[in-house]
Amino acid sequence: MNKQFDLIAIGTGSAASSVASRCRAADWQVAVIDSRPFGGTCALRGCDPKKVLVGAAELIDWGRRMQGKGIQAGELKINWRELMHFKRTFTEPVPKHREEGFRKAGIEAFHGRARFTGPTSIQVGEDTLEARHIVIAAGQKPADLKIPGSEHLIDSEHFLELDSLPSRILFIGGGYIAFEFAHVALRAGAQVTIVHRDSRPLRQFDSSMVELLVQHTRASGADIQLETEAVAVEKQSGGLAVRVSTSGQMRTLYADMVVHAAGREPEIDDMNLDAGDVAWDRHGVKVNEYLQSVSNPAVYAAGDAAASGGPPLTPVASYDGVLVATNLLKGNHAKPDYNGIPSAVFTIPPLASVGLTESAAREKGLKFTVKTESTGSWYSSRRVGESSSGYKTLVEERTDRILGAHLFGGAAAEVINVFALAIRSGIPARDLKHMIFSYPTHGSDVSYML
């Protein structure tokens, strides 16, 4: 069956839904396509369900920290099966609600893999769809590790669906997924190992704050092996054997479950993009400053599928979706500004960052002051029994603008938003320093960080 539309959006996550809803509100004929349950990565198999697990682990950790400080935690522990049931109360309703929302808006929904058959035509199942414009917003998938035995690994999506947690878990990779899930697994009683081939994990974050996190993660019970590359995985009767190489020396590590946490890539390689004259590479669809394909003006890309330079974060995907819709409806004029977008690693405690790292600022030749300190002795940390916390801020000398802020501690993922607002809005450091915050709160620590 052939069908005509003004817009086809590939994906049903934050970016695609933003574009589709706005164009439909302008009376465009809109279709959405997704081969997975509708809702996208964040709502179904990413940020939202992950944070449910993190919340439970935080409660366990807080109880342990307060032992001997007025709290007797007793047998407080995670019941993994019950936690998974609670998690599914958030994820299971999403596909039906999202599809019902599309239907009520008059957006036609298609289930299946989208493949280009021409510059403005898409094949999905038995249907051929034609449109004036196509938006690619299909998100990311785990990158191919290309090691023998990789079929024995699970990824983050499968981890979030485990009905029981194995005793020994090994994570390959040292990014968000490895550290966040490792902290959850540790509080649930698992033995955790992280192997990372580089000399330091989470390289996009400030090195000194990452070091605090690594030290704290090790103190929490994790075995973190850096400059160690996983080269093969073999299934054995007692579990899995992982062959690793450290400085050329081969060793074998053993686990009941091995999690692929070594990076993700745009999920676009099977879309037959060449048939649509859509230029792309491993970073995503190649786009111009308006998030429009550099090779096919009828096509735009948003979120993780676009090689736009924006960080792979859900709020960025939503932001991209709004910009693409604006450019479709009103002509190209809206350009993304990714300056001052905060990100957080939801470990326990979390790590958060916004703006430039110290090394990046020095590479740019900027003149700035650095203020950094471990804050485990501060009231806001001691009150909750948190001994491991710290911060680093960078302020440009001439302009007093905040170049970057890097936090590790109990409320880092919330407090970082204050610094993000200052960076994106151009609020000078002196104004933030003299701000009167509610006290006693983590927010009131901001003035002491500048």
Image (cartoon, rainbow, N blue to C red):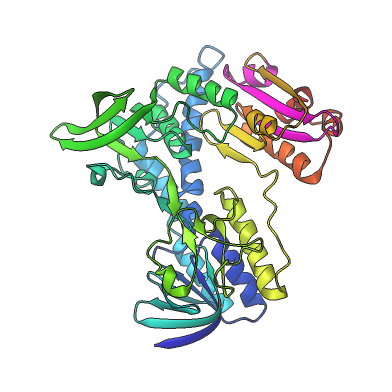
Tell me if 151 is positioned left or right of 431 in this view: left
Residue 350 can be seen, yes or no = yes
| Magenta segment boundaries in residue numbering | 378-406
Residue 441 can be seen, yes or no = no
**Where is residue 348 shown, x and y percent of the image?**
52, 29
Quadrant hosting residue 326 = bottom right
x 39%, y 63%: residue? 36
Question: Quadrant location of the N terminus?
Answer: bottom left
Tell me if 429 is positioned left or right of 136 in this view: right
**Where is residue 315 shown, x and y percent of the image?**
61, 52
Question: Quadrant location of the C terminus?
Answer: top right
User: Of all residues shown, which one is farthest toward the left?
Assistant: 237
Is 160 part of what is drawn in magenta? Answer: no
x 70%, y 46%: residue? 339
x 73%, y 67%: residue? 333
**Would you place residue 293 above or below residue 86 in this image?**
below
**Where is residue 221 shown, x and y percent of the image?**
40, 20
**Where is residue 129 shown, x and y percent of the image?**
45, 82
